[in-house]
């Protein structure tokens, strides 16, 4: 690494630049900025990544509040985000529009930050359960829905406060999936 790079990355980050902005300013790759930022303990400025982390933290906290056993993914980049009661859970988070509609795109490919790379994503292989977190546009409390990964469609739409076939709430999701696993 170049001498003084840590200080350059830290200063550019403090000014609010994204990883791409820091990379352009410092003259290194985005991957290098991500590694340095992570090593320095600096959070990303990417809104999408921050929203995703917020959803993961909401699901983990709610599960713990219900007395469920929660473990975080073993490493960053693991195919699932959490283990809840022994089930691999991948949390997906979106911001609802002003009418309370949430859309989750669950395609077979996952884009990296800035869409530079594409990775294969197989929800059935990677997790048993999808936690779909809807953040209301008015800042109200989030809604969390659960979907068995076997039943996941490429495009899932939810309307806050309205029933959505195939989605489970907290009280139904874990007993139902434990029964499926035991069979």
Image (tube, grey):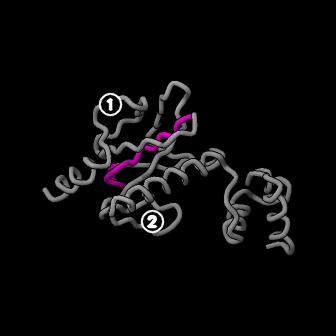
Q: Is residue 67 left or right of residue 38?
A: left
Quadrant of the snapshot with the C terminus: bottom left
Say which mark, if any, is on residue 163.
1
Helix, strand or loop at label 2? It is strand
Q: Position of residue 39 (x, y in %)?
A: 68, 71
Q: Based on the displayed image, in which of its 4 quarters is residue 72 positioned? A: bottom left
Q: Position of residue 156 (x, y in %)?
A: 40, 33
Q: Position of residue 131 (x, y in %)?
A: 40, 48
Q: Nearer the viewer, mark 2 or mark 1?
A: 1
2 or 1: tag closer to the N-terminus? 2
Whether the residues at callouts 2 and 1 have beta carbons within 8 Å, the answer is no
Q: Is residue 178 left or right of residue 147?
A: left
Based on the picture, tell me whether residue 6 belongs to the magenta stretch: no
Which residue is painted at 29% across and 40% down in the image? 151
Q: Is residue 40 above or below residue 99?
A: below
In the image, 181 versus 107, the foreground residue is: 181
In the image, 16 versus 122, the foreground residue is: 16
Quadrant of the snapshot with the N terminus: bottom right
Which residue in the structure is indicated by mark 2? 72
In the rendered structure, which segment of residues is drawn in magenta? 124-137
Which residue is painted at 70% across and 52% down in the image? 45
């Amino acid at each position: 690494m170049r001498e003084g790079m840590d200080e350059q990355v830290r200063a550019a980050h403090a000014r609010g630049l994204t990883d791409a902005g820091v990379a352009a300013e410092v003259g290194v790759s985005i991957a290098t900025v991500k590694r340095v930022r992570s090593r320095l303990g600096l959070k990303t400025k990417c809104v999408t990544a921050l929203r995703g982390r917020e959803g993961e933290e909401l699901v983990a906290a709610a599960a713990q509040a219900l007395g469920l056993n929660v473990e975080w993914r073993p490493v960053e980049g693991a195919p699932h985000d959490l283990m809840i009661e022994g089930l691999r859970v991948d949390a997906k988070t979106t911001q609802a529009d002003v009418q309370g509609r949430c859309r989750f795109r669950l395609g077979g490919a996952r884009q990296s930050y800035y869409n530079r790379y594409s990775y294969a994503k197989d929800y059935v292989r990677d997790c048993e359960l999808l936690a779909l977190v809807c953040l209301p546009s008015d800042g109200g409390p989030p809604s969390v829905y659960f979907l068995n990964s076997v039943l996941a469609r490429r495009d899932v739409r939810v309307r806050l406060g309205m029933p959505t076939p195939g989605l489970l709430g907290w009280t139904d999701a874990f007993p139902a999936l434990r029964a499926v696993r035991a069979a």
